[in-house]
Image: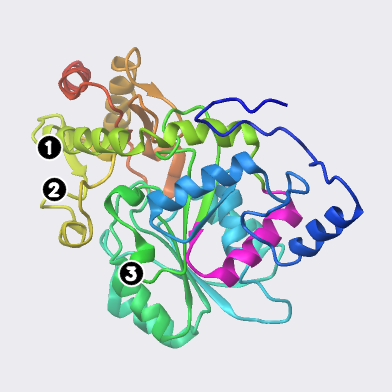
Amino acid sequence: MKKVNSTRTPIYRDSGFWLRDIPTMKKAFSDELEHPNEPDLYIYSRYRNPTVVETEKELAKIEGCQWALLTQSGLAAIDVALSIFQVAGLKNKWLFFTEIYGGTNSFIDKVLVARRGFEIVRFSSQGNSYSLDEFERLMQRHKPTVVYLESISNPMLIVADVPEIIKISHRFGARVIVDNTFATPHIFRPLDFGADLVIHSATKYLAGHGNLSAGVICGNDSDMLKHAIEYRKLVGHMLSPDDAYRLNDYLKTFHLRIAQHFNNAKAVAEFLASHSSVEKVLYPSLPNHPTAKIASKLFSNGFGGIVTFDINGNSFQQKQARCNAFIKNVSQSINLVPTLGDADTILMPIEPVWGDKFPFPGMVRLSIGIEPVQSLIQILDEGLKKI
């Protein structure tokens, strides 16, 4: 077949790859025992696929790491990252911050505890910030072998002092996994500070268009890479070549898009902080945010694309009614969609989703898009004034 003069990696939809003869097949399966990230001979797309590998290489460049592995969702990435540290017969404890994605908390309860029998230690925030002293006391008491946290929490946007947490964790012999979805490598790279693994829901900012589901695990350790490749292969957590191809295209505009997301979010947060209908705004760059100093210390190029704010009111019922009215007022321009990181601004009310954990009936999480920010501010202003 004639080679096409394209600048793009083709979409290799092969389920299995051509191995021309028995010696070639023997070599392919012999090489596979070492779990190479980019094999000389591809065997089967559940093992590895050329289109997926090319996208992984681009992600590793963005994350500034040695390797990246794609999965079909963020939760699949979480499963791979955690499962490579699971060893039969070891009764070690794992420590999880409580302020993490709800799906991760459900995975902990329904899979790690209920099905795999893990003993889990929870570390909670205090006043929308984390106490390093309390964290160290928990590490001393429980000696967990894995610590899992998010660099920016959802939905209260608590910024963790990740470098200090890594130092403390490593002093007690624990591995550290950081979900960096909200911060992205544009403003913060946990691996630069010694994190063992970083994960992203690539569905969000890395893809950035609300039409693709993917996850990624990033790291520098070659042994962890081999374990992650093996586990992903055996449980089938491989991203499709078509989705990998689209993601590769989206990554070309990642830094342009993310800068616009984060600049817009800062402008919206500052606008809402001065609005008469808003009681409180949570955004890491605002001086009154409990972790503003940590955010300023850790982040460059922005403070994230999520703004959480609380509409004022005199009672639970009034705040709930005002929140409902606001969402209805802006619904023609800002959709209620249960995700984030889309190119368009979208929103979620907090109390109906998180319930008793965050019983704030007037609170809304805005995922700020890349629209012209003054138009977005005008929509929010009009929506608030009408309530």
Vertical order, 235 against 1 (above or below) = below
In the picture of the structure, the residue carrying the numbered disc 1 is 270
Q: Was residue 302 drawn as part of the magenta stretch in this picture?
A: no
Is residue 382 visible from the viewing direction of this image?
yes
What kind of residue is marked 3?
Answer: Phe
Q: Is the residue under label 1 in contact with that under label 2 (CB below 8 Å)? A: yes
The location of residue 272, given as percent across then percent down, is 15, 33
Q: Is residue 195 left or right of residue 216?
A: left
In the picture, which quadrant includes the N terminus? top right
Which secondary structure, mark 1? Answer: helix
Foreground: 123 or 37?
Answer: 37
Q: CA distance from mark 3 to mark 1?
A: 30 Å
Which secondary structure, mark 2? Answer: loop
Q: Viewer-nearest of labels 3 and 2?
A: 3
Q: Residue furthest top?
A: 332
Vertical order, 190 against 272 (above or below) = below
In the picture of the structure, the residue carrying the numbered disc 2 is 286
What kind of residue is marked 2?
Answer: Leu
Foreground: 58 or 113?
Answer: 58
